[in-house]
Image (tube, rainbow, N blue to C red):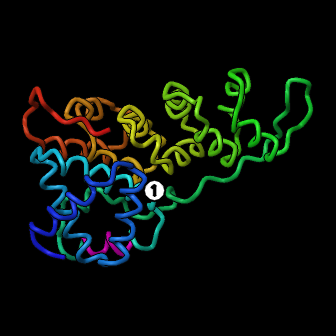
Amino acid sequence: MNGSEDTARLVRSLASLSDLTMRVSWLRDQLGRLGPTLFASTLEDVLSLAQSGQAESRQALLAFAILLVIDRRSPALTDLAREAERSALLGLSRLLAPTTPDSTLPAEDTRAVTDGAGRELTVGERRSLARRPSRKQLERLLSDPHPLVFETLLQCPTLTEADVLRVITKRPARLVAIETVANSPRWLARPTVRVALIQNPGSPQNITLPLLATCLKEDLVSVLDATSLDPVIRNAARETLLRLPPLRPTSVTLH
């Protein structure tokens, strides 16, 4: 695959898939099929088109960014980062954080969790409750320390965006919660959730940097104004902001 025609074909193929999870899976397959060199140049082209305001490319960029977040520890993305550096693909390089000790999985929290009567609940019992909790149970489960419990809760149909935001905006950050939300296309599809992850100073760079590419101008300005954020994140927001066209009444929102 090479050239603008092939990039346009890929963007159209993504647009034909109605479900974001399907788009991310399809891109993962493309990365395996094309290899890092062709995939990197295609992503660079999509990024350039998206930053010029091309609507379909903006939607394609969302799927690319979510792939980079969800697969952030994949060896394939390490190869993609090397290719971006080797070929001087500056746009793509800005989306990929270097591997650091901070990007390792958070340690499992082994604190005991009890029910209202003081009986200790197993992880399995808490996961069972998280599938269909009452509102009172949900309130307790939102603070559960175990990642598998929170992962199950994120799939609960009665969980709201406000519930998720309450967890991922906590200071200091709950790294387990941030990492778990960052593995969920369902919640990464929400612009407010993406911005909240970026705005939390405890969010790892391999989550925040790809998500910056999906932000609207006003969101990037808010990142620049957040002095508690790492200078790397604020500088990336500034560079992204400079490459976006002026706001128009018909600006496309990524969702």
Residue of label 1: 70
- Left/right placement of residue 210 relative to residue 178 reads left
Q: Residue furthest top?
A: 136
Q: Position of residue 168 (x, y in %)?
A: 51, 34
Q: Is residue 233 above or below residue 16?
A: above
Say which quadrant the N terminus sits in.
bottom left
Q: Position of residue 223 (x, y in %)?
A: 30, 34
Q: Position of residue 59 (x, y in %)?
A: 25, 47
Please tell me which residue is depicted at 58% across the width and 30% down the height of the picture: 159
Q: Is residue 234 above or below residue 158?
A: below
Say which quadrant the C terminus sits in.
top left
Query: Is the magenta region chiefly helix, strand or loop?
Result: helix
Q: Is residue 178 above or below residue 28?
A: above
- Label 1: which secondary element: helix
Please tell me which residue is depicted at 27% across the width and 32% down the height of the picture: 219
Mark 1 burial class by Cα count in 10 Å: few <14, some 14-19, many 20+: many
Please tell me which residue is depicted at 56% across the width and 44% down the height of the picture: 175
Q: Which residues are magenta?
A: 78-84
Please tell me which residue is depicted at 58% across the width and 57% down the height of the picture: 105
- Left/right placement of residue 248 relative to residue 169 reads left
Q: Position of residue 39 (x, y in %)?
A: 26, 71
